[in-house]
Image (cartoon, rainbow, N blue to C red):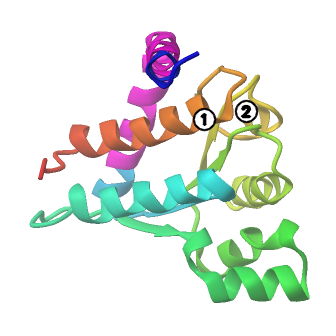
Amino acid sequence: MTHVETVSDYLAGLVRVLENLDRGQIANFIALVERARDEKRQIFIFGNGGSGANASHITGDLVKGASYKRDKRIKMMCLNDNDAAVLAYANDVGYDDVFVEQLKNFLNAGDVVIGISGSGNSVNILRAMDYANAQGAETVGFCGYPGGKLETVVKHVVHANIKDMQFAEDVHLIVGHVTMKALGGACY
């Protein structure tokens, strides 16, 4: 297979995945972020690896792209961006608790907590969601594959039902971009 064929196959596969997305899940997510913004609630997001990179990217887009020069601003924090806290908890407590322990410092009832796990089975994501649910937060799981445990423990889900990590990560980032656009984010 040539590189051009590989590119064509990948893009065709991504189009199929996007065509099969549940648009209602995405619209629900956008409404949840909009409501959090309007009610001045905090939004926390996190993930591991590529999902963590997506969490950071989505935060930047919503904190700046959908907030700049606006009266209503999105209060959002990416928990995997705090290297010192993540590494300290990982070293002293355990990696499974790097997100839940940070939530204990900041989370209030009614805040939104978004965990991104391509497999839906990342223990540190699941522990944070269990804690967030117990505190009365609105929990959202971005997942891929069959959804894993994450899909069953959150109140809201954005599920890229595909057994391919790169397609799942692509979808999650696209949902972040769609959310920014839907909330009036500028195109630069």
Bounds of the magenta segment: 8-34
Quadrant containing the N terminus in the rendered view = top right
Drawn side of residue 104 relative to residue 35, left or right = right
Residue receiving disc 1: 166
What crowding class fits label 1: few (fewer than 14 Cα within 10 Å), some (14-19), or many (20 or more)?
some
Q: In the depicted view, which residue is nearer to us: 188 or 140?
A: 188
Q: Amino acid at mark 1?
A: Gln
| 19 in magenta | yes
| 134 in magenta | no
Drawn side of residue 62 relative to residue 119, left or right = left
Residue 58: image location, x then y, percent: 42, 54
Residue 165: image location, x then y, percent: 67, 35
Q: Amino acid at mark 2?
A: Glu
The tag on residue 151 is 2
Taking the view exactly as shown, the residue that stands out farthest to the front is 2
Q: Is residue 54 above or below residue 24?
A: below
User: Main structural element of the magenta stretch: helix, strand or loop?
Assistant: helix
